[in-house]
């Protein structure tokens, strides 16, 4: 048998208007206008936390086609729905007097199954099952929405040849012993979960005087995951432009990505204490537990990012914080031109081609196999670094923590060398990379020793 025809009684659309159907005293059907536009639900957006949003579409008689998104749990509030609709349709097309109560039932009754599409919305990057969520490479039916200051995006228009040249200039704009470990940490963020290193995250602190180009370098390096990272308007500054709570919120959006926090100063905001708390909260993996207004515990959102912090002064008062960071020193002379960095910045709009080829490979069967094989060597590599640290500083308290940071960074370089594109670019800098890790290990060791001795 044929399915019953969709019955919209007591509502219909006539002459471009939603109408209420009534019978007069003679039994004739009368069309009473509800609004001077059409409206029906054409889709539903489902968020990762279970909340939903309706997509309402239609056409206004004078204003033309329109579309709006309205929270599903607020759809039944007729006042809010009317306000949202009248804003969407524009100034010319009204909801008629005393007809607001008909909007909710009319829109639902006029909606048909054939109109509906379902969109999965994520407000973060990172792994979801076997796929990596990233603007510019999201699958059909998936939408990724991020704050303006997190412009993660890979571009299909980015030229890989230009990107490779820009990457070489970026590595060589300072001593590769400095640039290579930082770049490796950026590459490590998307692969730490397939490698099983969820509990081994760390941060990088780039220390240098004003004018040492530390911010410009880091902005350009971050451009492998989004060209707009090279714009100053996307900078997240602790104390000056963003509170610690705001940065924690950004951290929940940047899953499996580096998070750039610029220009730490001990005399802004709450200074040293703010940074120490921020580093521990980010690297321990979640927000604080909080109560809602109804005194119900609000679920804390997880954090899976790798912080990259720049500043003039290292947070050297707490050994536990130092053990969570790789300390990198920038010594570029202020005021001196840096032609290679300028060339890398010129090509930064294409650097996301590096991020795209890296993320695609990390998701591939071959990439996953290589990551897991190399990750098995973490215990031995960590022991080597721990032995190096203990020999040179017998009393180092957090030697194993620092050794883990160095080991996972080293193994990420080993993995990257097997990438079909990046391996060729990075291979010439392997010796410099190893030298850089040893310099970083020595810096962490010396600084911890100074802290313990009260210097």
Image (spheres, rainbow, N blue to C red):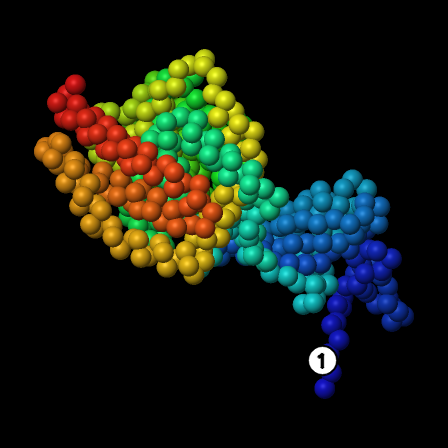
Return the residue found at the far left. Answer: 394
Q: Nearer the viewer, residue 202 or 161?
A: 161
Residue 245 picture location, percent across and down:
40, 34
Image quadrant holding the C terminus, namely: top left
Q: Residue at x 35, y 44 (%)?
A: 413
Residue 291 picture location, percent across and down:
37, 44
* Figure label count: 1
Residue 388 picture location, percent across and down:
16, 37
Q: Nearer the viewer, residue 322 or 332?
A: 332
Q: Residue at x 21, y 30 (%)?
A: 442
Quadrant in which residue 186 is drawn:
top left
Quadrant in which residue 368 is drawn:
bottom left
Q: Is residue 384 left or right of residue 58?
A: left
Residue 6 vs 39, above or below: the answer is: below
Image quadrant holding the N terminus, namely: bottom right
- Determine the secondary structure under disc 1: loop
Q: Residue at x 68, y 59 (%)?
A: 42
Q: Is residue 82 visible?
A: no
Return the residue found at the far bottom. Answer: 1
Q: Nearer the viewer, residue 425 or 282?
A: 425
Residue 371 vs 433, above or below: the answer is: below
Q: Nearer the viewer, residue 131 or 40?
A: 131
Q: Is residue 418 visible?
A: yes
Q: Which residue is mark 1?
A: 3
Q: Is residue 131 left or right of residue 454?
A: right
Q: Residues within 10 Å of mark 1 (few under 14, many from 20)?
A: few
Q: Is residue 95 left or right of residue 366?
A: right
Q: Residue at x 37, y 31 (%)?
A: 176
């Amino acid at each position: 048998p044929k399915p019953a025809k969709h019955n919209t009684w007591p509502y219909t659309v006539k002459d471009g208007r939603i109408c209420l159907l009534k019978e007069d005293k003679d039994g004739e059907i009368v069309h009473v206008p509800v609004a001077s536009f059409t409206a029906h639900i054409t889709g539903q957006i489902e968020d990762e936390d279970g909340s939903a949003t309706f997509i309402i579409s239609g056409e206004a008689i004078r204003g033309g086609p329109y579309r709006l998104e309205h929270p599903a749990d607020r759809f039944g509030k007729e006042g809010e729905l009317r306000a949202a609709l009248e804003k969407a349709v524009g100034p010319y097309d009204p909801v008629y007097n005393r007809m607001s109560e008909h909007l909710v039932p009319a829109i639902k009754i006029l909606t048909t199954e054939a109109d509906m599409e379902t969109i999965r919305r994520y407000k973060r990057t990172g792994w979801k099952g076997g796929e990596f969520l990233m603007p510019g490479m999201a699958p059909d039916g998936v939408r990724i929405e991020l704050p303006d200051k997190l412009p993660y995006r890979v571009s299909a228009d980015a030229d890989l040849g230009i990107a490779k040249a820009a990457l070489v200039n970026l590595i060589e704009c300072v001593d590769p012993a400095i640039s290579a470990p930082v770049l490796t940490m950026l590459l490590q963020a998307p692969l730490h979960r397939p490698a099983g290193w969820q509990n081994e995250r760390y941060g990088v602190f780039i220390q240098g005087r004003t004018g040492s180009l530390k911010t410009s370098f880091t902005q350009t390096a971050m451009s492998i995951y989004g060209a707009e990272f090279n714009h100053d308007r996307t900078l997240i500054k602790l104390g000056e432009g963003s509170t610690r709570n705001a940065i924690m919120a950004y951290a929940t959006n940047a899953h499996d990505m580096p998070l750039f926090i610029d220009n730490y100063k001990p005399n802004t905001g709450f200074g040293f204490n703010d940074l120490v708390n921020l580093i521990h909260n980010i690297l321990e993996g979640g927000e604080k537990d909080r109560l809602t207004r109804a005194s119900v515990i609000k679920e804390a959102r997880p954090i899976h990012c790798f912080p990259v912090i720049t500043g003039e002064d290292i947070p050297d008062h707490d050994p536990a914080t130092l053990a969570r960071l790789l300390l990198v020193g920038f010594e570029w002379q202020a005021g001196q031109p840096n032609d290679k960095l300028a060339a890398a910045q010129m090509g930064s709009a294409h650097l996301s081609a590096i991020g795209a080829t890296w993320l695609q490979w990390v998701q591939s069967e071959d990439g996953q196999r290589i990551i897991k094989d190399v990750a098995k060597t973490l215990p031995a590599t960590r022991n080597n670094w721990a032995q190096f640290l203990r020999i040179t500083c017998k009393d180092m308290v957090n030697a194993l923590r620092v050794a883990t940071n160095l080991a996972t960074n080293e193994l990420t370089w080993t993995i990257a060398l097997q990438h079909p594109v990046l391996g060729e670019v990075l291979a010439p800098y392997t010796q410099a990379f190893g030298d850089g890790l040893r310099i970083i290990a020595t810096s962490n060791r010396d600084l911890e020793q100074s802290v313990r001795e009260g210097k």
